[in-house]
Image: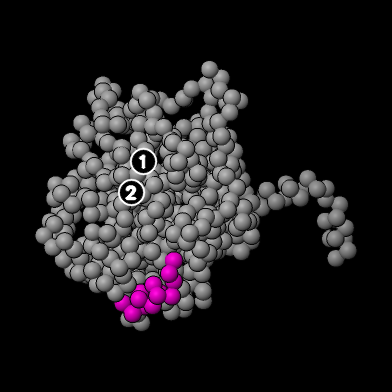
Amino acid sequence: MNDILYMLGSIPWWGWIIIFLILVAIKDVFFSKEHIIKHNFPVVGHLRYFLESIGPELRQYIVASDREELPFNRNERGWIYASAKNENNYEGFGTDEDIYRTNYIFINNSMLAFKIGKDHPNAKHPNFIACAKVMGSFNKRRRLYRPASIINVSAMSFGSLSAKAVESLNKGCLLANAYHNTGEGGLSPYHKMGADVVFHFGTGYFGVRGDDGNFSMEKIIKLVQENPQVRAIEVKLSQGAKPGKGGVLPASKITKEIAEIRHVPLGKDILSPPTHSAFSNVPEMVDFIEKIAEATGLPVGIKSAIGQLKQWEELASLMKETNRGPDFITVDGGEGGTGAAPPSFADHVSLPFINAFTDLYNVFKKQGITERIVFIASGKLGFPAKAAMAFAMGADSINVAREAMMSIGCIQAQSCHNNTCPTGITTHNKWLQAGINVKDKSERVNYYFTKFKKELLEITHACGYEHPSQFTMEDVDINLSDKNITKTLASTFAYRKTPVAFTSVQEHMDCPHLGGTFSKGKEVKTKEAETEETSVYDTD
């Protein structure tokens, strides 16, 4: 034994490396059955799989150009990061966009910009842009709601996002006077940090689920009564990432806390079916919406990805005939994607936002009922110019999901679905979550929303308008593929937006149904999240 130990001890360090490589080679040649490359090229074949595993990172940081990546390129992410950190988000030396590419948009500015008077609300609150419509006003809901911000956090549930991420978003929404959509995972304690809340549920009815797994009216009434910050209710029909597909919440991911919030049992897989059990056709859905609105007093809306229009035409016709139906409709573009989905769904099922919204809006416009619906737009619209396009098409408000995640540190690692998010945003790993400083991240959400609203207002004023709701489809041009011809949205999509009833921003400020901290007669005091233009940035 001593001789063996002496012999082993006499082997130099590089000798141990050679022995290790020989053992790996033997395993690859004689025992590895699953990989041809490892068998045919022992040892060095491992390098191929290592490079493949870090390929996304190599392309993101070394190979891809600033405007090449998807779903968000480096320039888009850079603008969000700089805005969220309250840093300079300007660019110099002109645009580096390919302004002749298909679907590139141009916003038509006015010869003379809109001028803000000294008594104008935006003189004191330079980033105040409330929704021009009041949710529930046509249907005379008992508790009407005017969102105090035209940009808000889209549906992302606790469970999909970590506790600290949800808390950061909610506190950021409070600072920015925005609302926070719960997603279909139920109303968690982390949604109760002060911001307005839109309670969202899907086919699993999490949070308002009875013991039989079906919708419970008693539970939603109790939830609304106990949580006055819930200002509206959203019923999910489908989402952009995977319309018409259900899901499974595996038992291994159901903690005691999640089980209590979602009203599901521990130790069992929980199915979210592709369809609702509470209704099976359009008339039944309208009845379901009206029952919830009557029981809770809140505006009730629906969220959906868009494809076939037949049932939407049926809904619009029924709403016209009966004066009943949803108070708001959230249109989720097929390019949306915080929810994990098979590539076949994420890549091919449902229309992208610009096609989805124009098709849907036209259905309700033909019935002459667009004024009674608040249209909420969702799908990579967290940039001021894209938001201006959405408002020109008929949107009344913007929901953002991945952009909000980026404002609190998401690096587009695209590992949301496997619980290994390196930033702790979409994982329940306590170690990874520990890096999230809730106070800092909530301020970053506020800064991002504030910068967004500031730039959107500046674009609005540059076009001669007081509020984004005044944009028309003649105010935005879009490049078409046919010899790069540029046409207005009105010419391209063959309809004109119905003018939104708008009098003044002051009317919005004075509205008794205004949400956010304005409705409480006070404003949250925060550091101003904008960098004023100075001559430092002027190089003309």
Contact between marks 2 and 1 (CB within 8 A): the answer is yes
- At 56% from the left and 34% from the top, the residue drawn is 532
Q: Range of the magenta residues?
A: 217-229
Residue 158: x percent and y percent?
Answer: 48, 64
Residue at which label 1 appears? 467
Q: Secondary structure at mark 1?
A: loop
Q: Residue furthest top?
A: 540
Type of amino acid under label 1: His
Q: Looking at this view, is 513 or 61 the one in front? A: 513
Quarter of the image with the N terminus is bottom right
Q: Secondary structure at mark 2?
A: loop
Residue 31: x percent and y percent?
Answer: 56, 56
Residue 187: x percent and y percent?
Answer: 44, 69
- At 37% from the left and 59% from the top, the residue drawn is 513
Q: Residues within 10 Å of mark 2 (few under 14, many from 20)?
A: many
Residue at which label 2 appears? 132
Residue 19 visible in this rendered orientation of the protein: yes
